[in-house]
Image (tube, coloured by chain):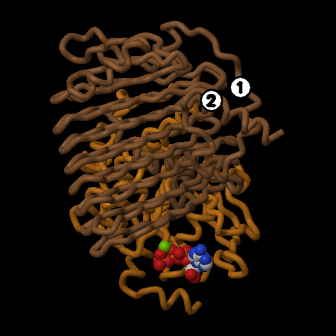
Chain colours: A orange, B brown
Amino acid sequence: MLTISNLQAAVGEKTILRGVDLDLAPGQVHAIMGPNGSGKTSLGRVLAGHPAYTVTGGSATLDGKDLLALDIEERALAGLFVSWQYPVEVPGVANTEFLRLAVNARRRHRDEPELNAKDFAPWIAEVAKTAQVPADYLTKPLNAGMSGGQKKRNEILQLHALSPSVAFLDETDSGLDIDAIKSVAASINAWRRADRAVILVTHFQRLLEMVKPDRVHVLADGRIQQSGGPELAEQLEREGYDWIVRV
Amino acid sequence: MIGSSVSDAAAAAARLGAPTTTLEDWRYVRVDSLQAALEAPRRVGAADLAPWLVEEEPSFVVVDGQFHHLGRADLPGVWGFRVMEAADQARSAAILATTTELPTVWALAGPCQQALAVRGDAGVPLTIVNAATGGPSGWTLRCELAPGARLHLVIRHAALGKARSAFRLEADLSRGAHLTVEEIQATPATILTSQADLTLAQDSQVTWTSCWTGGDLVRQRLDATLQGRGASCDFAALADTAGTAQAHVVTRVRHAAPNTSSRQLIKTVLADASRTSLDSVIAVDPGADGTDADLQNRNLILSPLARADTRPQLDIRADEVKAAHGATIGRLDADEMLYLRMRGFSETEATATLSHGWRDEVRGRLTR
Ligand SMILES: Nc1ncnc2c1ncn2[C@@H]1O[C@H](COP(=O)(O)OP(=O)(O)OP(=O)(O)O)[C@@H](O)[C@H]1O
Ligand SMILES: [Mg+2]
C-alpha cells in the first residue's frame, strides 16, 4: 500500500536520502533500524512533507496516490500517520480538543458527520482504553508538561484516534519504561488490521519481540543497505552495524 | 478632507460629552475612511438586543447614548433602578453622596442628559449593554464604591450598524472597595472609544478585563490613580484583529501612594492587514515606596501585512520600586504548526487552534 522507490531528499545542499526503496503491503509490519544520523527520521519527515526537505528524486505512493504531490495535511488525511521522535509541546492547546479537531478533519474528509465536544468525550475515552493510555492524558495540554515517555504514548493515542492506514512510528519505544514498552507494543498490536500497515523505527530488539516484523531493513548513509526477516534484527543486536556499513 | 472629518468627529464627540481624539495622541489612527462610512441611527427593538442580554441577570441597555430599557431591573432584592430627569440630577448627586454600604452606579446618558441611579448587591454582576446603531454617540457611567463595597460590571459593546460610540467610565473606589469589570466587544462594524478613569483609595482593588474581538477601530484608554496605600489594579486586554481593523490601547497607571501594585497584560492577535498599538506609562510619584508595577505586552502576528506597535514607558520618582515591563512580537511556532498539519489540520485550522490558546490567558478571566 506504501511504495517508496529510489527516494532522494536533501536539506539545503546536504543530501540526506540517497535512494530509498521500500514496499509495504497491507497487514505488514516493517522495522527500520540503523545508526544514529542515518536518515530514519528524515524518511518519515519526507513522506509527511516536512518543509525543511527537498525531494530531489524518486517517488512515494500511498494506495496508488502520489504522496509527494500532496500538501502536508492532505497526506495525513489520505491515511499517513508519521509520529515524532520528539513530539513538540503545544502548551495552549488541550489534548482532547486537539484530538477532536484532528478526528473531525478526518471525518469531514470522509464525508462523515463531525463530533461535538459532548459526543467526543465518551468516544475518545473508549479509544484511550483500547490504546492503553491512562485516561488523565486527555485532560492535559497537548504534550506540554509530559515526560518524554508520556509524549510517545500520547502519539499512540493519536494513532488510535485517527485510524490512518499506514503508521510510521519513530522510536516510539525510546524513553519508555519496561511496563510502558509492553503496553505500547500491545497497543500497536491492537491497532493492527489486515488493511493497515506499520513501519517501526527502532534501535532495540525488545519491541520487535513483541510487535513481530515481517521485514527488517537497515538504513545507513541514506540508503537501505540490508533487508531481511526478524533474524536480521537479532543479528544486529549481537553484532551491531559495523559489518553492514563497511560493505 | 481628512482634517475636516476628524474635526467633525471631534466636534460631535465634544457635543456629546464624550472623550475625543484630541484628548490623547492617537498616533497610529486614521479615522477618515471609517468616519465616512457611518450609517444613520435607527430604532431597535428587544429582539435586536436579545443576544447581549442574559435572562435572570440585572442589566440595562443604552442605545446610541440613550437609555433604552432597563433589562431585568425587576429582580427582587438585587438591583434597583431609578430614572431621573434632568431636574433630578442635583438630588441624585446628593443620593450618591450619602450612599454608604452599597455600591452605586450612576449613568448619565444622551444629549438630553437623562440620569439613572442604580444600587444593588455586589454578589450579582450588572450587565450593561452599550449598543450603537449609527452615527456618533457617547455616554458616561459613574461608579462610586463605598468603603468595602464590591461591584461587578459586565459591559457589552454591541454594534448594530456602522456607528461611532464613545463610552466612558469613571469610578471612585473608597477604602477596601473592589471593582471588577469585564468589557467585551465581539461585533464588527463600529468605531468604539472606551475610556476609564479610576481613582483608588487605600486597599481598594480594580480587576479589569477587556476583550476586543470585533470593530473597525477600537481605542481604549485606562487611567488609574492608585491614591491610597495598598491599592492595586489588575488590567488585562486582548485585541484580536483581522482585515483592516485597528485596536489601540493606552494606559496611564499612576502610583501615588506607598505599597501600591499594578499588573497589566495586553495581548494581541493580528491577522491580515490589521494593526494594534500599546502606549503605556507607569508613573511612580515621589514617596510611593514599595510600589510593584508590571506590564507585559505580547503580540502574535499571523500575517506579514499586520503591524503591532508598542511603547511602554516608565517614569519613576521613588525609591524601592519594583517596576518591570516587557514586550514581545512573535509569530506562531513553525514546529507546532507542522505538528498540527501532520495530523490533518489545514493551515487555517492550525492557525486558529494555536492562536486560540494564546487568547485564553486573557479570555479565561471572563466569567460571561
Ligand atoms: N533540519 C535539518 N537540517 C540539516 N540537517 C538535518 C536536518 N534534519 C536532519 N538533518 C541531518 O540529516 C541526517 C539524518 O538525520 P535523521 O534525524 O534522519 O537521523 P536518524 O536516523 O533518525 O537518527 P537517530 O537514530 O539519531 O534518530 C543527519 O546527518 C542530520 O544531521
Ligand atoms: Mg531519528
Up the image or down, B238 lies above or below A104; here it is below
- The residue sitting at 29% across, 67% down in the picture is A176
Subunit bearing disc 2:
B
B337 or B258, nearer to the observer: B258
The mark that comes first in sequence, 2 or 1, is: 1
Q: What residue type is disc 1 on?
A: Leu
- The residue sitting at 43% across, 48% down in the picture is B223
- The percent position of residue B123, horizontal first and vertical second, equals 20, 28
Up the image or down, B223 lies above or below A143; here it is above
Question: In the rendering, which numbered label is found on residue B38?
Answer: 1
**Tag 2–tag 1 contact (CB < 8 Å):** yes
Query: Which image quadrant: the N terminus of chain B?
Result: top right
What is the distance, in whole Å, between disc 2 and disc 1 at their CAs? 7 Å
- The percent position of residue B279, horizontal first and vertical second, equals 54, 57
Instruction: Give residue B190's quadrant in the image.
Output: top right
* Left or right, residue A50 beside residue A213: right
B101 or A109, nearer to the observer: B101
- The residue sitting at 33% across, 50% down in the picture is B234
Subunit bearing disc 1:
B
- The residue sitting at 30% across, 71% down in the picture is B321
What residue is disc 2 on? B164
A232 or A45, nearer to the observer: A45
- The percent position of residue B327, horizontal first and vertical second, equals 49, 64
Q: What residue type is disc 2 on?
A: Arg
Q: Is residue A166 visible?
A: no
